[in-house]
Image (cartoon, coloured by chain):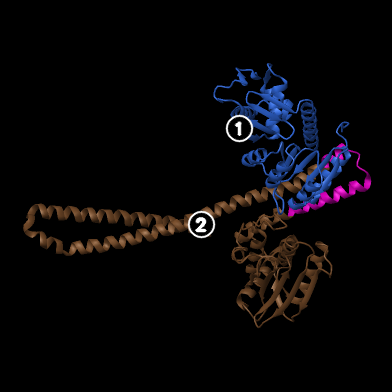
Protein backbone atom coordinates (compact mmCIF):
# COMPACT_ATOMS: atom_id res chain seq x y z
CA UNK A 1 0.00 0.00 0.00
CA UNK A 2 2.75 2.38 1.08
CA UNK A 3 4.78 1.44 -1.96
CA UNK A 4 1.96 2.12 -4.43
CA UNK A 5 1.28 5.50 -2.75
CA UNK A 6 4.92 6.45 -3.17
CA UNK A 7 4.78 5.47 -6.81
CA UNK A 8 1.63 7.55 -7.44
CA UNK A 9 3.30 10.48 -5.67
CA UNK A 10 6.35 10.29 -7.93
CA UNK A 11 4.31 9.85 -11.08
CA UNK A 12 2.32 12.93 -10.00
CA UNK A 13 5.54 14.91 -9.49
CA UNK A 14 6.68 13.86 -12.93
CA UNK A 15 3.35 14.87 -14.55
CA UNK A 16 3.39 18.23 -12.73
CA UNK A 17 6.95 18.85 -13.86
CA UNK A 18 5.90 18.10 -17.45
CA UNK A 19 2.86 20.41 -17.17
CA UNK A 20 5.11 23.15 -15.78
CA UNK A 21 7.57 22.61 -18.59
CA UNK A 22 4.90 22.80 -21.33
CA UNK A 23 3.26 25.84 -19.67
CA UNK A 24 6.60 27.61 -19.63
CA UNK A 25 7.16 26.75 -23.26
CA UNK A 26 3.64 27.91 -24.18
CA UNK A 27 4.02 31.16 -22.23
CA UNK A 28 7.32 32.03 -23.81
CA UNK A 29 6.05 31.21 -27.34
CA UNK A 30 2.99 33.38 -26.68
CA UNK A 31 5.22 36.15 -25.36
CA UNK A 32 7.50 36.00 -28.37
CA UNK A 33 4.69 35.92 -30.95
CA UNK A 34 2.72 38.79 -29.37
CA UNK A 35 5.86 40.94 -29.18
CA UNK A 36 6.74 40.00 -32.76
CA UNK A 37 3.31 41.11 -34.00
CA UNK A 38 3.58 44.42 -32.09
CA UNK A 39 7.04 45.08 -33.45
CA UNK A 40 5.82 44.35 -36.96
CA UNK A 41 2.82 46.65 -36.54
CA UNK A 42 4.48 49.66 -34.92
CA UNK A 43 8.09 49.27 -35.80
CA UNK A 44 10.87 51.18 -34.19
CA UNK A 45 8.57 53.95 -33.04
CA UNK A 46 7.18 52.05 -30.05
CA UNK A 47 10.08 49.75 -29.34
CA UNK A 48 11.06 51.46 -26.09
CA UNK A 49 7.50 51.10 -24.76
CA UNK A 50 7.35 47.43 -25.66
CA UNK A 51 10.36 46.68 -23.56
CA UNK A 52 8.77 48.30 -20.55
CA UNK A 53 5.48 46.45 -21.05
CA UNK A 54 4.42 44.65 -17.88
CA UNK A 55 3.76 41.43 -19.83
CA UNK A 56 7.54 41.06 -20.28
CA UNK A 57 8.21 41.18 -16.54
CA UNK A 58 5.31 38.84 -15.78
CA UNK A 59 6.44 36.37 -18.40
CA UNK A 60 9.97 36.48 -17.09
CA UNK A 61 8.99 35.97 -13.43
CA UNK A 62 6.44 33.26 -14.13
CA UNK A 63 8.97 31.59 -16.42
CA UNK A 64 11.54 31.60 -13.65
CA UNK A 65 9.03 30.22 -11.15
CA UNK A 66 8.13 27.46 -13.57
CA UNK A 67 11.81 26.69 -14.10
CA UNK A 68 12.29 26.37 -10.34
CA UNK A 69 9.23 24.06 -10.17
CA UNK A 70 10.66 21.91 -12.96
CA UNK A 71 14.06 21.77 -11.27
CA UNK A 72 12.52 20.74 -7.94
CA UNK A 73 10.40 18.11 -9.67
CA UNK A 74 13.39 16.71 -11.52
CA UNK A 75 15.44 16.73 -8.32
CA UNK A 76 12.74 14.77 -6.49
CA UNK A 77 12.54 12.26 -9.32
CA UNK A 78 16.32 11.96 -9.32
CA UNK A 79 16.31 11.21 -5.56
CA UNK A 80 13.52 8.69 -6.04
CA UNK A 81 15.37 6.94 -8.88
CA UNK A 82 18.60 6.82 -6.85
CA UNK A 83 16.69 5.23 -3.97
CA UNK A 84 15.08 2.76 -6.36
CA UNK A 85 18.47 1.83 -7.83
CA UNK A 86 19.91 1.25 -4.35
CA UNK A 87 16.91 -0.85 -3.46
CA UNK A 88 17.31 -2.90 -6.65
CA UNK A 89 20.98 -3.47 -5.84
CA UNK A 90 20.13 -4.54 -2.28
CA UNK A 91 17.36 -6.75 -3.60
CA UNK A 92 19.76 -8.45 -6.04
CA UNK A 93 22.18 -9.08 -3.17
CA UNK A 94 19.31 -10.42 -1.10
CA UNK A 95 18.30 -12.88 -3.85
CA UNK A 96 21.92 -14.06 -4.16
CA UNK A 97 22.20 -14.44 -0.37
CA UNK A 98 18.88 -16.25 -0.02
CA UNK A 99 19.82 -18.56 -2.89
CA UNK A 100 23.03 -19.36 -1.06
CA UNK A 101 21.24 -19.83 2.28
CA UNK A 102 18.75 -22.18 0.64
CA UNK A 103 21.26 -24.15 -1.36
CA UNK A 104 23.79 -24.79 1.41
CA UNK A 105 21.52 -26.84 3.70
CA UNK A 106 19.84 -28.39 0.68
CA UNK A 107 23.14 -29.65 -0.73
CA UNK A 108 24.08 -30.99 2.68
CA UNK A 109 20.79 -32.91 2.99
CA UNK A 110 21.18 -34.26 -0.55
CA UNK A 111 24.74 -35.34 0.19
CA UNK A 112 23.72 -37.28 3.32
CA UNK A 113 20.76 -38.92 1.60
CA UNK A 114 22.91 -40.03 -1.33
CA UNK A 115 25.62 -41.23 1.10
CA UNK A 116 23.12 -43.30 3.07
CA UNK A 117 21.74 -44.70 -0.18
CA UNK A 118 25.08 -45.56 -1.77
CA UNK A 119 27.18 -46.72 1.18
CA UNK A 120 26.90 -49.03 4.11
CA UNK A 121 27.15 -46.38 6.77
CA UNK A 122 27.63 -47.80 10.29
CA UNK A 123 24.80 -47.25 12.81
CA UNK A 124 26.26 -44.46 14.99
CA UNK A 125 27.44 -42.55 11.90
CA UNK A 126 23.95 -42.87 10.43
CA UNK A 127 22.55 -41.18 13.53
CA UNK A 128 25.11 -38.37 13.22
CA UNK A 129 24.14 -37.81 9.61
CA UNK A 130 20.45 -37.82 10.41
CA UNK A 131 20.93 -35.26 13.19
CA UNK A 132 22.90 -33.06 10.77
CA UNK A 133 20.07 -33.36 8.27
CA UNK A 134 17.55 -32.36 10.94
CA UNK A 135 19.68 -29.30 11.71
CA UNK A 136 19.71 -28.39 8.04
CA UNK A 137 15.95 -28.75 7.72
CA UNK A 138 15.59 -26.47 10.77
CA UNK A 139 17.84 -23.95 9.07
CA UNK A 140 15.69 -24.10 5.94
CA UNK A 141 12.54 -23.82 8.03
CA UNK A 142 13.88 -20.76 9.86
CA UNK A 143 14.82 -19.06 6.63
CA UNK A 144 11.43 -19.70 5.04
CA UNK A 145 9.64 -18.58 8.21
CA UNK A 146 11.65 -15.39 8.38
CA UNK A 147 10.75 -14.48 4.80
CA UNK A 148 7.06 -15.31 5.33
CA UNK A 149 6.89 -13.54 8.72
CA UNK A 150 8.52 -10.39 7.41
CA UNK A 151 6.15 -10.35 4.47
CA UNK A 152 3.28 -10.81 6.98
CA UNK A 153 4.53 -7.96 9.17
CA UNK A 154 4.80 -5.63 6.18
CA UNK A 155 1.29 -6.46 5.07
CA UNK A 156 0.08 -6.24 8.69
CA UNK A 157 -1.15 -9.82 8.49
CA UNK A 158 0.80 -11.13 11.48
CA UNK A 159 -1.50 -11.63 14.44
CA UNK A 160 0.59 -11.29 17.58
CA UNK A 161 -0.52 -12.93 20.76
CA UNK A 162 0.08 -10.11 23.24
CA UNK A 163 0.13 -10.88 26.95
CA UNK A 164 0.97 -8.91 30.05
CA UNK A 165 4.15 -10.45 31.52
CA UNK A 166 6.70 -9.77 34.20
CA UNK A 167 9.68 -8.36 32.31
CA UNK A 168 12.24 -10.17 34.50
CA UNK A 169 10.45 -13.49 34.20
CA UNK A 170 10.07 -13.48 30.42
CA UNK A 171 13.57 -12.22 29.71
CA UNK A 172 15.12 -14.84 32.02
CA UNK A 173 13.05 -17.57 30.36
CA UNK A 174 14.14 -16.44 26.91
CA UNK A 175 17.79 -16.32 27.98
CA UNK A 176 17.56 -19.90 29.34
CA UNK A 177 15.96 -21.06 26.08
CA UNK A 178 18.66 -19.36 24.02
CA UNK A 179 21.39 -20.91 26.21
CA UNK A 180 20.02 -24.35 25.41
CA UNK A 181 19.48 -23.66 21.75
CA UNK A 182 22.91 -22.15 21.12
CA UNK A 183 24.71 -24.47 23.55
CA UNK A 184 25.97 -21.58 25.71
CA UNK A 185 26.85 -21.71 29.41
CA UNK A 186 27.09 -19.20 32.26
CA UNK A 187 30.67 -18.70 31.14
CA UNK A 188 29.38 -17.11 27.94
CA UNK A 189 26.50 -15.07 29.33
CA UNK A 190 26.44 -12.54 32.15
CA UNK A 191 23.12 -11.17 33.40
CA UNK A 192 23.06 -7.87 35.24
CA UNK A 193 20.37 -5.71 36.84
CA UNK A 194 16.70 -6.37 37.27
CA UNK A 195 13.36 -4.60 37.28
CA UNK A 196 9.96 -5.07 38.75
CA UNK A 197 7.83 -4.02 35.86
CA UNK A 198 5.32 -5.55 33.49
CA UNK A 199 5.46 -5.42 29.74
CA UNK A 200 3.08 -6.46 26.98
CA UNK A 201 4.73 -8.90 24.61
CA UNK A 202 4.21 -11.79 22.25
CA UNK A 203 6.51 -14.52 23.60
CA UNK A 204 7.08 -16.12 20.19
CA UNK A 205 7.99 -12.80 18.60
CA UNK A 206 10.31 -11.87 21.45
CA UNK A 207 11.99 -15.28 21.11
CA UNK A 208 12.70 -14.41 17.45
CA UNK A 209 14.29 -11.15 18.62
CA UNK A 210 16.50 -12.99 21.11
CA UNK A 211 17.41 -15.73 18.63
CA UNK A 212 18.58 -13.13 16.14
CA UNK A 213 20.61 -11.20 18.72
CA UNK A 214 22.26 -14.38 20.07
CA UNK A 215 22.86 -15.72 16.57
CA UNK A 216 24.57 -12.47 15.51
CA UNK A 217 26.66 -12.30 18.70
CA UNK A 218 27.92 -15.84 18.04
CA UNK A 219 28.46 -15.36 14.30
CA UNK A 220 30.39 -12.13 14.73
CA UNK A 221 32.60 -13.12 17.66
CA UNK A 222 36.07 -14.16 16.66
CA UNK A 223 36.78 -16.67 19.40
CA UNK A 224 34.85 -17.21 22.65
CA UNK A 225 31.42 -15.64 22.88
CA UNK A 226 30.94 -13.13 25.72
CA UNK A 227 27.44 -11.73 26.04
CA UNK A 228 26.28 -9.34 28.75
CA UNK A 229 22.56 -8.74 29.19
CA UNK A 230 21.63 -5.82 31.40
CA UNK A 231 18.09 -4.87 32.23
CA UNK A 232 16.72 -1.81 33.91
CA UNK A 233 13.77 0.55 33.64
CA UNK A 234 12.89 4.20 33.73
CA UNK A 235 9.48 5.76 34.30
CA UNK A 236 8.06 4.69 30.97
CA UNK A 237 10.27 2.05 29.45
CA UNK A 238 11.78 -1.31 30.26
CA UNK A 239 15.37 -1.20 28.94
CA UNK A 240 17.43 -4.18 27.85
CA UNK A 241 21.08 -3.81 26.78
CA UNK A 242 22.46 -6.78 24.87
CA UNK A 243 26.25 -6.48 24.53
CA UNK A 244 28.84 -8.72 22.92
CA UNK A 245 32.60 -8.52 22.52
CA UNK A 246 32.48 -9.31 18.81
CA UNK A 247 33.93 -7.55 15.79
CA UNK A 248 31.78 -4.44 16.26
CA UNK A 249 30.01 -2.27 13.71
CA UNK A 250 31.38 0.88 12.08
CA UNK A 251 29.48 4.12 12.67
CA UNK A 252 28.53 4.26 8.98
CA UNK A 253 26.98 0.79 9.15
CA UNK A 254 25.21 1.46 12.46
CA UNK A 255 22.89 3.83 10.61
CA UNK A 256 21.89 1.19 8.08
CA UNK A 257 22.06 -2.00 10.11
CA UNK A 258 18.26 -2.21 10.63
CA UNK A 259 17.47 -1.52 6.97
CA UNK A 260 15.88 -4.30 4.99
CA UNK A 261 18.39 -6.42 3.00
CA UNK A 262 21.34 -4.47 4.40
CA UNK A 263 24.43 -6.59 4.98
CA UNK A 264 27.89 -5.51 6.06
CA UNK A 265 30.62 -6.70 3.73
CA UNK A 266 33.76 -6.76 5.80
CA UNK A 267 36.84 -8.77 4.85
CA UNK A 268 37.65 -9.32 8.54
CA UNK A 269 34.23 -10.71 9.34
CA UNK A 270 34.27 -14.30 10.60
CA UNK A 271 30.92 -14.83 8.91
CA UNK A 272 29.90 -14.24 5.33
CA UNK A 273 26.47 -15.82 5.38
CA UNK A 274 23.08 -14.20 5.95
CA UNK A 275 20.13 -12.62 4.20
CA UNK A 276 20.12 -9.09 5.57
CA UNK A 277 16.67 -9.65 7.05
CA UNK A 278 17.42 -10.57 10.69
CA UNK A 279 17.81 -7.16 12.28
CA UNK A 280 15.10 -5.65 10.07
CA UNK A 281 12.80 -8.38 11.40
CA UNK A 282 13.87 -7.58 14.98
CA UNK A 283 13.22 -3.87 14.46
CA UNK A 284 9.76 -4.50 13.01
CA UNK A 285 8.80 -6.78 15.93
CA UNK A 286 9.97 -4.24 18.51
CA UNK A 287 8.15 -1.49 16.63
CA UNK A 288 4.93 -3.53 16.64
CA UNK A 289 5.29 -3.79 20.45
CA UNK A 290 5.41 0.00 20.70
CA UNK A 291 9.12 -0.11 21.52
CA UNK A 292 12.35 0.93 19.88
CA UNK A 293 15.76 -0.58 19.20
CA UNK A 294 19.11 1.10 18.73
CA UNK A 295 22.68 -0.03 18.26
CA UNK A 296 25.94 1.25 19.64
CA UNK A 297 29.50 0.21 18.89
CA UNK A 298 32.78 2.02 19.25
CA UNK A 299 33.87 0.44 15.97
CA UNK A 300 36.02 -2.42 14.72
CA UNK A 301 36.72 -5.12 17.34
CA UNK A 302 35.05 -3.10 20.12
CA UNK A 303 31.93 -5.20 20.48
CA UNK A 304 28.32 -4.16 19.93
CA UNK A 305 25.43 -3.19 22.21
CA UNK A 306 21.82 -3.41 21.11
CA UNK A 307 19.38 -1.46 23.30
CA UNK A 308 15.75 -2.53 23.30
CA UNK A 309 13.17 -0.29 24.97
CA UNK A 310 9.68 -1.63 25.56
CA UNK A 311 6.81 0.41 27.05
CA UNK A 312 5.90 -0.49 30.64
CA UNK A 313 2.32 -1.70 30.99
CA UNK A 314 -0.03 0.96 32.42
CA UNK A 315 2.72 3.58 32.51
CA UNK A 316 3.57 4.21 28.89
CA UNK A 317 1.68 4.31 25.59
CA UNK A 318 -1.46 3.24 27.47
CA UNK A 319 -3.82 3.56 24.55
CA UNK A 320 -1.54 1.73 22.15
CA UNK A 321 -0.89 -1.14 24.58
CA UNK A 322 -4.59 -1.50 25.42
CA UNK A 323 -5.33 -1.61 21.71
CA UNK A 324 -2.80 -4.44 21.26
CA UNK A 325 -4.38 -6.43 24.11
CA UNK A 326 -7.87 -5.77 22.79
CA UNK A 327 -6.98 -7.11 19.33
CA UNK A 328 -5.45 -10.24 20.89
CA UNK A 329 -8.52 -10.82 23.08
CA UNK A 330 -10.86 -10.42 20.13
CA UNK A 331 -8.86 -12.91 18.11
CA UNK A 332 -8.78 -15.37 21.01
CA UNK A 333 -12.56 -15.17 21.40
CA UNK A 334 -12.96 -15.77 17.67
CA UNK A 335 -10.71 -18.83 17.80
CA UNK A 336 -12.56 -20.18 20.90
CA UNK A 337 -15.97 -19.75 19.29
CA UNK A 338 -14.73 -21.47 16.17
CA UNK A 339 -13.47 -24.40 18.27
CA UNK A 340 -16.80 -24.74 20.08
CA UNK B 1 31.01 -47.26 -5.34
CA UNK B 2 33.75 -48.37 -7.76
CA UNK B 3 37.28 -49.17 -6.66
CA UNK B 4 39.47 -46.09 -6.69
CA UNK B 5 42.97 -46.24 -8.21
CA UNK B 6 43.81 -42.81 -6.81
CA UNK B 7 43.66 -43.99 -3.19
CA UNK B 8 46.02 -42.05 -0.96
CA UNK B 9 45.74 -38.81 -2.94
CA UNK B 10 45.82 -35.83 -0.60
CA UNK B 11 42.82 -33.52 -0.85
CA UNK B 12 42.39 -30.16 0.83
CA UNK B 13 38.72 -29.37 1.43
CA UNK B 14 38.04 -25.66 1.94
CA UNK B 15 34.45 -25.38 3.17
CA UNK B 16 33.04 -23.24 5.97
CA UNK B 17 29.68 -25.04 6.28
CA UNK B 18 30.29 -27.65 8.97
CA UNK B 19 27.37 -29.79 8.00
CA UNK B 20 28.46 -30.14 4.37
CA UNK B 21 32.15 -30.48 5.24
CA UNK B 22 31.53 -33.44 7.59
CA UNK B 23 29.63 -35.32 4.86
CA UNK B 24 32.25 -34.54 2.24
CA UNK B 25 35.11 -35.56 4.51
CA UNK B 26 33.38 -38.86 5.22
CA UNK B 27 32.77 -39.63 1.55
CA UNK B 28 36.24 -38.65 0.42
CA UNK B 29 37.83 -40.73 3.18
CA UNK B 30 35.63 -43.67 2.20
CA UNK B 31 37.00 -43.32 -1.35
CA UNK B 32 40.49 -43.70 0.05
CA UNK B 33 41.61 -40.09 -0.14
CA UNK B 34 43.50 -38.39 2.66
CA UNK B 35 41.44 -35.32 3.51
CA UNK B 36 42.26 -32.18 5.43
CA UNK B 37 39.71 -29.48 5.98
CA UNK B 38 40.07 -25.71 6.27
CA UNK B 39 37.04 -23.77 7.53
CA UNK B 40 37.99 -20.35 6.15
CA UNK B 41 40.29 -18.66 3.65
CA UNK B 42 43.04 -17.86 6.15
CA UNK B 43 43.16 -21.41 7.49
CA UNK B 44 43.33 -22.72 3.92
CA UNK B 45 46.34 -20.49 3.25
CA UNK B 46 48.07 -21.93 6.32
CA UNK B 47 47.49 -25.47 5.03
CA UNK B 48 48.76 -24.58 1.57
CA UNK B 49 51.92 -23.00 3.00
CA UNK B 50 52.64 -26.11 5.06
CA UNK B 51 51.78 -28.89 2.62
CA UNK B 52 51.35 -29.88 -0.97
CA UNK B 53 48.07 -31.40 -2.13
CA UNK B 54 47.02 -33.49 -5.10
CA UNK B 55 43.71 -31.68 -5.36
CA UNK B 56 41.87 -28.78 -3.72
CA UNK B 57 38.11 -28.45 -3.33
CA UNK B 58 37.24 -24.82 -2.86
CA UNK B 59 34.09 -23.00 -1.74
CA UNK B 60 33.71 -19.37 -2.87
CA UNK B 61 31.90 -17.62 -0.02
CA UNK B 62 34.49 -17.98 2.72
CA UNK B 63 35.32 -15.78 5.71
CA UNK B 64 38.49 -13.64 5.63
CA UNK B 65 39.55 -14.58 2.09
CA UNK B 66 37.09 -15.64 -0.58
CA UNK B 67 37.56 -18.62 -2.89
CA UNK B 68 38.46 -16.49 -5.92
CA UNK B 69 41.30 -14.76 -4.07
CA UNK B 70 42.41 -18.08 -2.70
CA UNK B 71 42.44 -19.72 -6.15
CA UNK B 72 44.65 -16.87 -7.38
CA UNK B 73 47.09 -17.34 -4.49
CA UNK B 74 47.15 -21.13 -4.88
CA UNK B 75 47.93 -20.75 -8.58
CA UNK B 76 50.91 -18.51 -7.81
CA UNK B 77 52.39 -21.09 -5.48
CA UNK B 78 51.26 -24.31 -7.15
CA UNK B 79 50.51 -23.74 -10.82
CA UNK B 80 49.55 -27.35 -11.45
CA UNK B 81 47.45 -28.48 -8.49
CA UNK B 82 43.90 -29.23 -9.73
CA UNK B 83 41.26 -26.99 -8.15
CA UNK B 84 37.57 -27.83 -8.10
CA UNK B 85 35.29 -24.94 -7.15
CA UNK B 86 32.25 -26.22 -5.28
CA UNK B 87 29.83 -23.38 -4.67
CA UNK B 88 26.23 -22.23 -4.52
CA UNK B 89 27.08 -19.42 -6.93
CA UNK B 90 25.56 -20.47 -10.23
CA UNK B 91 25.92 -17.29 -12.30
CA UNK B 92 27.85 -17.46 -15.54
CA UNK B 93 30.05 -14.52 -14.47
CA UNK B 94 31.16 -16.44 -11.37
CA UNK B 95 31.84 -19.59 -13.40
CA UNK B 96 33.96 -17.67 -15.88
CA UNK B 97 35.79 -15.81 -13.12
CA UNK B 98 36.54 -19.07 -11.30
CA UNK B 99 37.83 -20.80 -14.41
CA UNK B 100 39.84 -17.77 -15.50
CA UNK B 101 41.51 -17.56 -12.11
CA UNK B 102 42.79 -21.05 -12.63
CA UNK B 103 40.16 -23.46 -11.34
CA UNK B 104 40.04 -26.68 -13.35
CA UNK B 105 36.41 -27.48 -12.73
CA UNK B 106 33.32 -25.76 -11.35
CA UNK B 107 30.47 -27.65 -9.69
CA UNK B 108 27.40 -25.95 -8.22
CA UNK B 109 25.51 -26.83 -5.06
CA UNK B 110 23.40 -28.87 -4.62
CA UNK B 111 25.39 -31.56 -6.40
CA UNK B 112 25.21 -35.32 -6.86
CA UNK B 113 27.75 -37.26 -4.83
CA UNK B 114 28.59 -39.61 -7.68
CA UNK B 115 29.14 -36.73 -10.10
CA UNK B 116 31.47 -35.02 -7.63
CA UNK B 117 33.49 -38.20 -7.10
CA UNK B 118 33.75 -38.82 -10.85
CA UNK B 119 34.90 -35.28 -11.48
CA UNK B 120 37.55 -35.63 -8.77
CA UNK B 121 38.77 -38.87 -10.33
CA UNK B 122 38.85 -37.20 -13.74
CA UNK B 123 40.94 -34.34 -12.38
CA UNK B 124 43.38 -36.72 -10.69
CA UNK B 125 43.58 -38.79 -13.88
CA UNK B 126 44.40 -35.72 -15.96
CA UNK B 127 46.96 -34.66 -13.40
CA UNK B 128 48.67 -38.05 -13.66
CA UNK B 129 48.49 -38.06 -17.47
CA UNK B 130 49.98 -34.58 -17.56
CA UNK B 131 52.73 -35.58 -15.13
CA UNK B 132 53.70 -38.71 -17.08
CA UNK B 133 53.53 -36.81 -20.38
CA UNK B 134 55.72 -33.98 -19.14
CA UNK B 135 58.18 -36.16 -17.21
CA UNK B 136 59.38 -37.70 -20.49
CA UNK B 137 59.84 -34.36 -22.25
CA UNK B 138 59.48 -31.42 -19.87
CA UNK B 139 60.70 -28.79 -22.34
CA UNK B 140 59.42 -28.43 -25.89
CA UNK B 141 60.63 -26.02 -28.57
CA UNK B 142 58.97 -24.92 -31.81
CA UNK B 143 59.76 -21.82 -33.85
CA UNK B 144 60.87 -19.10 -31.45
CA UNK B 145 58.92 -20.67 -28.59
CA UNK B 146 60.21 -22.71 -25.68
CA UNK B 147 57.67 -24.23 -23.32
CA UNK B 148 58.54 -25.61 -19.91
CA UNK B 149 55.70 -27.95 -18.97
CA UNK B 150 56.97 -28.34 -15.40
CA UNK B 151 56.72 -24.76 -14.21
CA UNK B 152 54.43 -23.70 -17.11
CA UNK B 153 56.71 -20.86 -18.17
CA UNK B 154 57.24 -20.07 -21.84
CA UNK B 155 59.89 -18.11 -23.64
CA UNK B 156 58.25 -16.51 -26.68
CA UNK B 157 61.02 -14.66 -28.51
CA UNK B 158 62.25 -12.21 -25.89
CA UNK B 159 59.05 -12.34 -23.81
CA UNK B 160 58.33 -14.66 -20.94
CA UNK B 161 54.76 -15.76 -20.22
CA UNK B 162 53.11 -18.28 -17.95
CA UNK B 163 50.44 -20.70 -19.10
CA UNK B 164 47.49 -21.87 -17.02
CA UNK B 165 47.29 -25.60 -16.38
CA UNK B 166 44.46 -26.04 -18.85
CA UNK B 167 46.28 -24.08 -21.56
CA UNK B 168 49.34 -26.24 -20.96
CA UNK B 169 47.26 -29.40 -21.10
CA UNK B 170 45.58 -28.42 -24.37
CA UNK B 171 48.96 -27.58 -25.89
CA UNK B 172 50.49 -30.79 -24.58
CA UNK B 173 47.69 -32.83 -26.07
CA UNK B 174 48.11 -31.14 -29.46
CA UNK B 175 51.90 -31.66 -29.36
CA UNK B 176 51.47 -35.30 -28.46
CA UNK B 177 49.21 -35.71 -31.49
CA UNK B 178 51.41 -33.75 -33.86
CA UNK B 179 50.32 -33.91 -37.54
CA UNK B 180 47.08 -35.60 -36.53
CA UNK B 181 43.61 -34.07 -36.44
CA UNK B 182 42.37 -33.55 -32.90
CA UNK B 183 38.64 -32.96 -32.69
CA UNK B 184 37.07 -30.51 -30.26
CA UNK B 185 35.08 -33.32 -28.72
CA UNK B 186 38.28 -35.30 -28.15
CA UNK B 187 39.90 -32.32 -26.41
CA UNK B 188 36.84 -31.82 -24.22
CA UNK B 189 36.85 -35.46 -23.21
CA UNK B 190 40.58 -35.90 -22.75
CA UNK B 191 41.56 -32.56 -21.25
CA UNK B 192 38.35 -31.32 -19.59
CA UNK B 193 36.79 -34.71 -19.00
CA UNK B 194 33.48 -33.25 -20.16
CA UNK B 195 31.21 -35.36 -22.36
CA UNK B 196 29.27 -32.64 -24.00
CA UNK B 197 28.57 -31.37 -27.49
CA UNK B 198 27.56 -27.91 -26.43
CA UNK B 199 30.69 -26.48 -24.88
CA UNK B 200 33.01 -26.77 -27.87
CA UNK B 201 33.26 -22.96 -28.01
CA UNK B 202 35.37 -23.16 -24.86
CA UNK B 203 37.99 -25.05 -26.91
CA UNK B 204 38.00 -22.36 -29.59
CA UNK B 205 38.72 -19.73 -26.92
CA UNK B 206 41.67 -21.73 -25.62
CA UNK B 207 43.04 -22.25 -29.13
CA UNK B 208 42.69 -18.53 -29.82
CA UNK B 209 44.71 -17.83 -26.66
CA UNK B 210 47.44 -20.32 -27.58
CA UNK B 211 47.68 -18.80 -31.07
CA UNK B 212 47.99 -15.34 -29.53
CA UNK B 213 50.90 -16.57 -27.42
CA UNK B 214 52.83 -18.64 -29.95
CA UNK B 215 51.88 -17.75 -33.52
CA UNK B 216 53.84 -14.98 -35.28
CA UNK B 217 50.52 -13.92 -36.85
CA UNK B 218 47.54 -15.34 -34.92
CA UNK B 219 45.21 -14.51 -37.83
CA UNK B 220 47.25 -16.76 -40.14
CA UNK B 221 48.43 -19.59 -37.89
CA UNK B 222 51.29 -21.79 -39.01
CA UNK B 223 51.55 -24.13 -35.98
CA UNK B 224 48.04 -24.64 -34.61
CA UNK B 225 45.93 -25.10 -37.71
CA UNK B 226 42.16 -25.26 -37.99
CA UNK B 227 40.92 -28.21 -39.99
CA UNK B 228 37.52 -27.30 -41.35
CA UNK B 229 34.59 -29.13 -39.71
CA UNK B 230 37.06 -31.51 -38.05
CA UNK B 231 39.12 -29.78 -35.36
CA UNK B 232 42.73 -28.72 -34.96
CA UNK B 233 46.15 -29.98 -35.94
CA UNK B 234 49.62 -29.10 -34.67
CA UNK B 235 52.18 -28.80 -37.46
CA UNK B 236 55.81 -27.83 -37.28
Q: Residues within 10 Å of mark 2 (few under 14, many from 20)?
A: few
**Can you say whether A124 is above or below A221 in the image?**
above
- In magenta stretch: residue A126: yes
Distance from label 1 to label 2 (Cα)? 53 Å
Which is more toward the observer, B195 or B6?
B6
Q: Mark 1 touching mark 2, by CB under 8 A?
A: no
Visible residue check, residue A166: no
Give me the chain letter of mark 1: B
Give me the chain letter of mark 2: A
Q: Is disc 2 on the same chain as disc 1? A: no
Magenta segment, principal secondary structure?
A: helix
From the image, state whether disc 1 or disc 2 is nearer to you: 1
Secondary structure beneath dot 2 equals helix
Residue at position x 79%, y 35% in the image: B120
Chain B in the picture: what colour?
A: blue
Tell me where residue A148 appears, x and y as whole percent: 67, 55
Quarter of the picture holding the N terminus of chain B: top right
Label 1, on which residue? Answer: B158
Q: Magenta part of the protein: which range? A: A113-141
- In the rendered image, the residue lying farthest to the left is A45
Which is more toward the observer, A199 or B229?
B229
Chain A in the picture: what colour?
A: brown
The numbered mark at residue A83 is: 2
Amino acid sequence: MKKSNTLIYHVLVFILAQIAWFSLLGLWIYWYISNYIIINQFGDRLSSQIISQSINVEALISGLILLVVISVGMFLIFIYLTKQMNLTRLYDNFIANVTHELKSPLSSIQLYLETLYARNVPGPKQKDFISLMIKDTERLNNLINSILDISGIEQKKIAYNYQVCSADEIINTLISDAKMQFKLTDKHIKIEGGTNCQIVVDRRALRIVFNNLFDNAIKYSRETVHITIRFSSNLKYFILDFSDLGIGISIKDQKKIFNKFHRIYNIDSPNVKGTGLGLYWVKEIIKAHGGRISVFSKGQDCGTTFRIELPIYLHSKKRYIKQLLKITQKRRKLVDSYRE
Amino acid sequence: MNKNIYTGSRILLVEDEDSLAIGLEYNLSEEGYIVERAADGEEALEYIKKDEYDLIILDIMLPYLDGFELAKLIRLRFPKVPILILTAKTGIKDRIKGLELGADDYLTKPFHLEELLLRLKGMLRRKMWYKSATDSKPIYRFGENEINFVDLTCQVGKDKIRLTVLEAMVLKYLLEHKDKIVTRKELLEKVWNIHSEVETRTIDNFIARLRKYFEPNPAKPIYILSIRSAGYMFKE
